[in-house]
């Protein structure tokens, strides 16, 4: 979706609003929902296991001595590309007047180009090649993510949107766990894993574009995309809207702490927990996929329960603070006690804290948005608090590990302190309990 103010999206003539821009009123079918959910699931399966399992394996094979710093460089650059790509692609797709519709061309191109990027990653044998391949993957996967996300307000009426959005949103954690289990527990082979991901993207997403039907946006109806206008309006003054500013900063800090540690789970199991020594015959990928299973199960449960409880008691700040503290506690446990049983407990705690945080903090933010008319733009700005830490955290963690001779104790304690700081930053918000 575009991040322009509503005034810039007004018709350029007196003609009636075209069907492509009208609010949807026709309920969508179960088949439509199933196809959209499956498409989103495949999008995340194609990205997350590469980040969690395949990239660390490749970086370590290229340069085992400097693997932590190199992984930080690769993932940070890729995350920065993603940070820029998502809102820009969303704005461009809003203005696409292809006969295929506004979103289908981007999904079609994203599927083909993501498969190409996966092939480049598969054959990468240097850090530079990994940087290029992963940056391209982040770019092209955002073709898919931005377009697929916009289909929800494009096609789903308000009466169905809450339920369906919940189903589609589950594709991220489910994509993480299914992808990691498939790569780490089922396929267990580097080459086959990449071939599987390439085939999955093409086999699922290409047919999806053929079955998806969209109304065509008349050419010239909306003003063309202008980067200057986009950047000018992609900003909220924290002095004018302090509650939103505090909410944004708190989320940025919590996400920075969380991402600083979790991005290095693979090497943590390898170098601190010594997983393969504890379980001969097992691989690090198998251990990582098992932890992902525990985390996602508790994340899903806490997302549902946390949201329900915060609704019942009408308390948002309290739940966000408690969730942030739980995340910090889990990180402290992993730093102080790098043993497999403690890591399992900490991972479950982390899932509880992060799931509750995602559910309730999003509600809190929607209650402090500056303008009802600019919700899309404002939520786009909020998304920077999610994506920017993913760019900074790997590089920060890589530098810390490099300077401390790979001390995961220091890394996880630092990450816990950062997350704990985020808990206190929620307190100044005044308009929400």
Image (cartoon, rainbow, N blue to C red):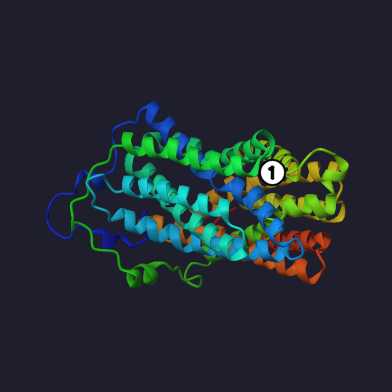
Q: Quadrant of residue 94?
A: bottom left
Above or below, 324 against 212 in this view is: below
Q: Nearer the viewer, residue 135 or 9?
A: 135
Residue extending furthest toward the left? 14
Label total for image: 1
Few, some or many residues within 10 Å of mark 1 (<14, 14–19, 20+)? many
In the figure, is residue 426 to the left or right of 228?
right
Q: Which residue matches tag 1?
A: 351
Residue 352, position as x, y percentages in the image: 69, 43
In the figure, is residue 398 to the left or right of 175?
right
At 50% from the left edge and 63% from the top edge, which residue is drawn?
81
Q: Nearer the viewer, residue 48 or 87?
A: 48
Q: Quadrant of residue 309?
A: top right
At 18% from the left edge and 55% from the top edge, which residue is drawn?
219
Residue 383, position as x, y percentages in the image: 50, 57
Residue 60, position as x, y percentages in the image: 71, 57
Q: Quadrant of residue 321?
A: bottom right
Above or below, 287 against 119 in this view is: above
């Amino acid at each position: 979706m575009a991040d322009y103010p509503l005034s810039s999206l007004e018709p350029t003539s007196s003609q009636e609003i075209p069907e492509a821009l009208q609010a949807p009123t026709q309920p969508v079918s179960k088949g439509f929902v199933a196809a959209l959910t499956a498409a989103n699931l495949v999008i995340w399966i194609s990205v997350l296991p590469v980040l969690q399992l395949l990239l660390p394996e490749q970086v370590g094979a290229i340069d085992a001595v400097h693997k932590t710093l190199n992984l930080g460089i690769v993932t940070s650059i890729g995350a920065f590309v993603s940070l820029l790509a998502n809102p820009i692609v969303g704005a461009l797709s809003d203005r696409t007047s292809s006969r295929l519709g506004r979103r289908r061309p981007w999904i079609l191109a994203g599927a083909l180009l993501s498969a190409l990027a996966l092939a480049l990653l598969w054959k990468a044998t240097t850090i530079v090649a990994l940087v290029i391949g992963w940056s391209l993957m982040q770019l092209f996967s955002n073709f898919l993510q931005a377009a697929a996300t916009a289909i929800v307000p494009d096609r789903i009426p308000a009466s169905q949107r809450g339920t369906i959005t919940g189903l589609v949103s589950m594709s991220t954690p489910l994509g993480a766990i299914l992808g990691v289990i498939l790569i780490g527990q089922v396929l267990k082979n580097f080459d086959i894993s990449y071939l599987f991901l390439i085939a999955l993207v093409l086999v699922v997403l290409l047919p999806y574009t053929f079955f998806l039907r969209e109304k065509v946006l008349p050419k010239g109806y909306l003003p063309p995309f202008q980067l200057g206008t986009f950047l000018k309006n992609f900003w909220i003054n924290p002095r004018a809207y302090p509650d939103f500013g505090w909410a944004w900063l708190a989320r940025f800090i919590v996400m920075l702490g969380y991402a600083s540690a979790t991005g290095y789970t693979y090497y943590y199991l390898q170098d601190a927990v010594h997983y393969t020594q504890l379980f001969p015959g097992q691989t690090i990928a198998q251990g990582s996929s098992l932890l992902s299973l525990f985390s996602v199960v508790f994340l899903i449960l806490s997302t549902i329960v946390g949201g329900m409880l915060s609704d019942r008691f009408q308390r948002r700040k309290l739940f966000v603070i408690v969730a942030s503290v739980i995340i910090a506690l889990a990180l402290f446990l992993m730093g102080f006690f790098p043993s497999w049983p403690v890591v399992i407990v900490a991972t479950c705690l982390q899932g509880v804290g992060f799931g509750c945080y995602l559910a309730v903090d999003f509600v809190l933010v929607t209650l402090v948005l500056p303008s009802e008319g600019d919700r899309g733009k404002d939520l786009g700005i909020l998304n920077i608090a999610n994506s920017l830490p993913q760019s900074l955290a790997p590089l920060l963690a890589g530098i810390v590990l490099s300077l401390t001779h790979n001390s995961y104790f220091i890394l996880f304690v630092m990450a816990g302190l950062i997350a704990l700081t985020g808990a206190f930053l929620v307190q100044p918000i005044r308009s929400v309990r």
